[in-house]
Image: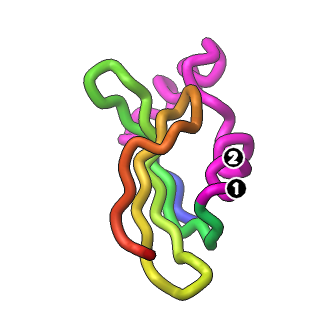
Amino acid sequence: MALGFGGDHERARAALQAGEVLPLPQLLERVAREQPGQVLAVELERHDGLWVYELKLLDPAGRLVKLEVDARSAELLRRKGGR
């Protein structure tokens, strides 16, 4: 699994310590309840003041799915592919 943090690991670490983002294992557990699959890549980015995890995964049928998930609440913001 590839992990990327927009080239700014310290900013991402500070966001985690400040409670602005969920720890990745906790977020992935929540996402898997709604969208099962093998995680291929994860990026943490800032969009208009909101931390967003961008996930690429392979669903059980072998289709590529791209998700954008609110990093604080694990709310699905956008989904492309699959289904």
Residue at screen point 26% across, 23% down: 48
User: Mark 1 sits on what residue?
Assistant: 33
Which quadrant does the N terminus fall into?
Answer: bottom right
**Residue 46 % position (x, y):** 35, 30
Marks 1 & 2, CB-CB < 8 Å contact? yes
In the rendered image, residue 31, in percent from the top left (x then y), is placed at 62, 51
Identify the colour scheme used. Answer: rainbow
Residue 52, quarter of picture: top left
Bounds of the magenta segment: 5-34
Dot 1 surroundings within 10 Å: few (below 14), some, or many (20 or more)?
few
The amino acid at mark 2 is Arg
Residue reaching furthest to the left? 48
The type of residue carrying mark 1 is Arg
Residue ID at (68%, 35%):
23
Outermost residue toward the front?
Answer: 83
Residue 30: mark: 2
